[in-house]
Image (tube, grey):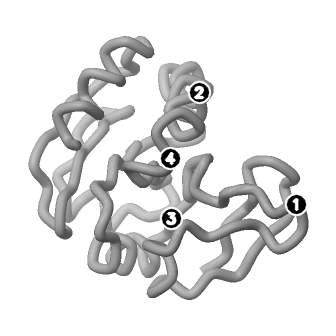
Amino acid sequence: MLIKCPHCGKFNRLPLDRINQKPICGSCREGLLLGPIDADQASFKEILGQSKLPVIVDFWAPWCGPCKMFAPTFMASAKKHGESILHVKLDTEANPGIGQEFSIRSIPTLAGFKNGTEIERISGALPPQQLDQFISSLL
């Protein structure tokens, strides 16, 4: 899987079995998980299956205004909590099968997963404090 470094913007090839080993960027040596991971249909299921950390998923679409407004908040959360919970973004327009499988009816929708199983869900663009509370409930 390719992960874009949140610090220098370079793409890093990361085998998903190494996602639990606090991977660092090959160029700048900063943590790769301190930013959201852009998932597609194939990598999404693998991330949920491989991660020993809890996973928070932002189901979004590029045409959605509230999704665009929420993106910086989600990015800041990834920088703050990236070592304890994986932040994943999934474009429901590019990956409609996943949106359908998880019954995503409104966006943005945040879903929390532990051991590959969804444990909590909330819809709407959250303010930072409410997002922190949601993350705390997953940890």
Could you say which disc has been placed on residue 39 in the image? 3
Query: Sequence-wise, which precedes: disc 2 or disc 1?
Result: 1
**Residue to which mark 2 is pinned:** 68
**Residue to which mark 4 is pinned:** 82
Query: In which quarter of the view is residue 130 placed?
Result: top left
Percent position of residue 98, x then y: 31, 65
Asked which secondary structure carries label 1, the reply is loop
Q: Is residue 2 left or right of residue 83?
A: right
Query: Sequence-wise, which precedes: disc 2 or disc 3?
Result: 3
Percent position of residue 132, x then y: 34, 23
Asked which secondary structure carries label 4, the reply is loop
Q: Residue at x 13, y 41 (%)?
A: 120
Q: Residue at x 75, y 58 (%)?
A: 5
Separation (CA) of disc 1 from disc 4? 17 Å
Q: Are marks 1 and 4 in contact (CB under 8 Å)?
A: no
Separation (CA) of disc 3 from disc 4? 16 Å
